[in-house]
Image (cartoon, rainbow, N blue to C red):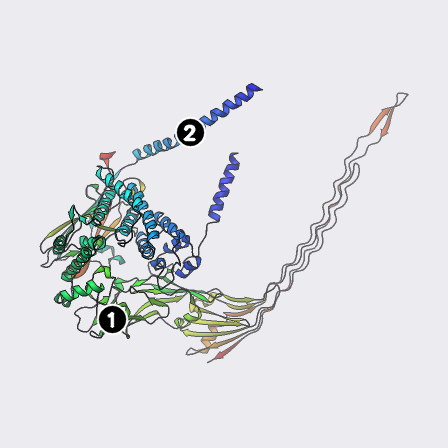
Amino acid sequence: MWRFEKDVRLRGKFVEVATETMRRSFPLAQLAALFVLTSCATPYVYRFDQIDGSAAGDSAVAGCQMHEDTDMHAELRVDPAGEHAVSIEVTNQTDQVLQVQWTKLTMTRADGLVTTLHPDADLGWIEPGQKQLARLIPLALPASGNAALTLDGQRFRLTVPMLVRRERRTYCYDFLAHVLENKEHR
Amino acid sequence: MRPFRLILVGWFCWLATGCATQYVLPMTSSELVDLGVGKALVVYLGQPDASPSVCDTKSKGPHVNEFTSDFQDALVKGFVDGKIQPALWERCVKRVLRNLPEDRAAAFYDQLMREHRKLIRGSAIEEDPKAAERLVALQNLYLDRRRDQNGHPEVVGPLFEELRKTLGKADALGPVARDMGRELLATLDIEKGRWQDQDVSVAMMDELAAAGNTMTLERFAKRLPDPALSAEASRRIIRVHIALSPFSEVRDAAQPVEERVLAEGKNRISLAQHPLVRAWFDPNNMPMRSVVVRQDVWRQTVKLLGSSAARPTPSVLPELPFRGALWAELKSISRPVSVCVGRKNFDPSPCLDVSDIALDNPFTYLDRSATFHFQDGVSLASVVPLAAANDFSLPVRIAGVAATTLNWGLSFERPEDLQFSGAQAGSDGPDLEVHVERPHPSRFIFYATRPSATYLAIVESPDLGQFRVASVGARGYSGTDGSPGMNGSDGAQCQDGGDGSDGGSAGNGGPGGDGGDVHVRVFCGQYDCNDMLASVRGVVVSLGGAGGPGGRGGVGGRGGNGGSGRSPSTSTDAQGNTVQTDAGCSAGSSGRSGNNGADGYDGPNGSPGRVTFEVVP
């Protein structure tokens, strides 16, 4: 009888130790699983091509100037070098100062999500004939997984309100996202 | 043990989901106030077109009575969980904070900055635009806060110190976190009078103004601790705005305009000096909605809801800022003007003061910031005049003069049937007096009066086929079920079981009540009476109540089981002969089961009452 009790106690102790070990190692196992998963996840990079958004014919175009005029020219690059920002260089082609309303910029995604963007450094107006370069933040883009893949072929619209010749104008720029496998980081 | 645990977990899951409060949507701001709990606030703010004015305890319209910790926690959780759009949430929290006492505000800022830390240290903001937008909202709230409000230094101080150290390490943060963190710390330096490693001075501000850099000047105006320097920053923002102003009269009178905007925060136009020429709404600068009237005919209240072509499902109606939406041409002013905005915008454009604007619509009101809202908690009787209208009209007066009208679409959802029935089983429906009016070619109003009260319902013509005004007799009472028969007794050994007794007969159902008499007066007004009569004849009815169902007959008793049999037994006598001592017996047979009782008959249906139509030309 004593031997039986001892066996039970030993078995109980073994179960306790085993359970405790498993409990302690569970987070490690989770981490390991996460590591395996993330290291296997395909990393992606983005390429954004500027497109003619006026052809889309959606109602959001209302109040939007889809084509540039002779007063202003903007060079845009979305997520250049994967730096999670939009690069915009505005040239004032008028004889008056031009003010970009830097705190009112928005990016609208195909699913209707609107996010705000602003320059990473404070900027003033643009003198006649001058250029101004801004780096707009924040631009969050998924680096891997389905969230990234679903953006492939989606349209992004950058809305840039400005005061041109003292008049309020809103320029809109459309981009088509291409999600590409990042082979360098595989 | 395992199945038991699974059952337990399942039960808890069921309890958790089954007991979660379900709110009726759309939820108006009045309904939110009545509910008065944080979860309801989150649900309200999660609706399209929800108004943040519910968060303002000093708002003119319905608002939370007191911003308790329940509201605070729910608001933060709803935001973190992505249930509230960050921009709307930010506007709500701004309104909350401006009314909170210092200590409560400090605790709220502590909570917000802890959430800010979680976001900026996490990876979500690099990949999830919604998370990045939440970070922007939190940062805006902190950087735009009132100068006399802040988190507790022992809470926010270490958070910023940690951020400063983290930013000092290469690649410790992703690009989004790094950029946002740098912006936060740079702006916080302004609170110490420093900007980009220099003391902030008037000369620095002059340079910024000369470059048209209102972004930095606005940071100075909001965050500089010295009120005099802050005012200098404000002055230079105004100067930049004046330089950019399209109004020649503003640029030509730069100095007085600068002083006025600095003192009053706006360049209000005197309508006595510059009378109104004409006014209009700019449809490109405002939400366009159709007003949908949802009626509760039994409470005689309505909800005013809104739908749009892009979103046909009705939601709450949006608030509408008049700034940029309402425009006016004034005598001797070179360009159209809109409504003045808040003083922090330092806009020198000539503008209409909110006190000069009035709305001629009892279902709307204008708040201090010239934003119009719809009233909540409206009675059905009060919307009767709307039934005559083609549109939902919002006439606007400027300086007491009828200026323009905003027209939105208008429709009435089909209401619940006005069906009146007897109070008790089998009782007759009430007699009704029904008046029918046609205030609009495509709408009818039904006033149904029973002795105790009058109920009205407004119905669009296409809905007449599905709508009823009825006096209905109550359903008859149900017949009682028959009593079950007794089971037969089981037989003893060798004996038969007893017979079960028959089930009792059921009672018959009661007769349905008769429909009440209905007298319908059709007020034709300008419409053809025959047409009117044809339209409403099938709508107003009297119906007899259904007879009550008969009861079910009692089930007959089961026959008793027969007793068991017994084998014969023998013994040997003195002579050695085998003698049968017991002949034994065969098993008893089971008793006969009783017959089921007879089912009761359904009661007869009630008869409809008389419906008479009277045409009133």
Q: Which residue is mark 2?
A: A22
- Please tell me the numbered disc located at residue B279: 1
Write down the chain letter for disc 2. Answer: A
Query: Which quadrant of the rendered structure holds the C terminus of chain A?
Result: top left
Amino acid type, label 2 = Met
Work out whether B16 lies above or below B530. Answer: above
Work out whether B12 lies above or below B306. Answer: above
Q: Where residue B421 sits: x, y (%)?
A: 56, 66
Using the image as rendered, state which of residue B494 and residue B206 is in the foreground. B206
Q: Where residue B595 sits: x, y (%)?
A: 72, 50
Using the image as rendered, state which of residue B554 and residue B186 is in the foreground. B186
Determine whether the residue tagged by mark 2 lies in a helix, strand or loop. Answer: helix
Badge 1 crowding class, 10 Å Cα cut-off, few under 14, some 14 to 19, many 20 or more, is many
* Residue B60 can be seen, yes or no: yes
* Residue B414 can be seen, yes or no: no
Write down the chain letter for disc 1. Answer: B
Q: Are marks 1 and 2 in contact (CB under 8 Å)?
A: no
Q: Where residue B116 sits: x, y (%)?
A: 30, 46
Image-based side of A70 in relation to B567, left or right: left
Determine whether the residue tagged by mark 1 lies in a helix, strand or loop. Answer: strand
- Between the C-alphas of marks 1 and 2, the distance is 75 Å
